[in-house]
Image: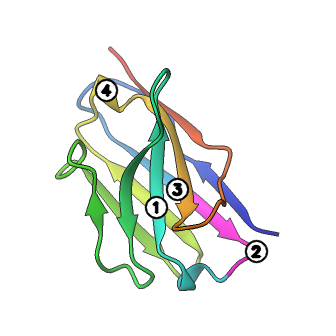
Amino acid sequence: QVQLMESGGGVVQPGGSLTLSCLASGFSFKSYAMTWYRRAPGKDRELVARIGETGDRPRYNDAVKDRFTISRDNVKNVLSLQMNDLKPEDTAKYYCNGEYTEWWGPGTQVTVSS
């Protein structure tokens, strides 16, 4: 059974940092490119970042480029998202996902507010 469990969200002030993690199980993690998505209240889900199977070819939404870093550990089956210089517009629920799958975790809430 595929499971994705996000963690690391919280409330942070503008300019602060958070690191999100996603623990994957039930599938061959190293065989899938992985993504982070987010959904803000009243908005559509949007792709935040994507990373290849071996950690190569990271891609970022223009809104987070140069502030967020996606990474993965194929031994521990963990996907991470380091988020720096957070802005109020980054407030959303963040989800990890196997690319081109319908596998989703419950998400973790990130709130950026002073």
Disc 1 target residue: 35
Dot 3 crowding, Cα within 10 Å, few <14, some 14–19, many 20+: many
Q: Amino acid at mark 1?
A: Thr
Q: Are marks 1 and 4 in contact (CB under 8 Å)?
A: no
Seen at 29% across and 69% down, the residue is: 58
Seen at 55% across and 68% down, the residue is: 78
Q: Nearer the viewer, mark 3 or mark 4?
A: 4
Q: CA distance from mark 1 to mark 3?
A: 12 Å
Disc 4 target residue: 89
**Depicted 38 relative to depicted 92: above or below:** below
Magenta segment boundaries in residue numbering:
22-27
Query: Nearer the N terminus, badge 2 or badge 1?
Result: 2
Q: Quadrant of the C terminus?
A: top left
Disc 3 target residue: 21
Q: Amino acid at mark 4?
A: Glu
Q: Is residue 28 left or right of residue 3?
A: left
Q: Amino acid at mark 2?
A: Gly
Q: CA distance from mark 1 to mark 4?
A: 19 Å
SS class, disc 3: strand
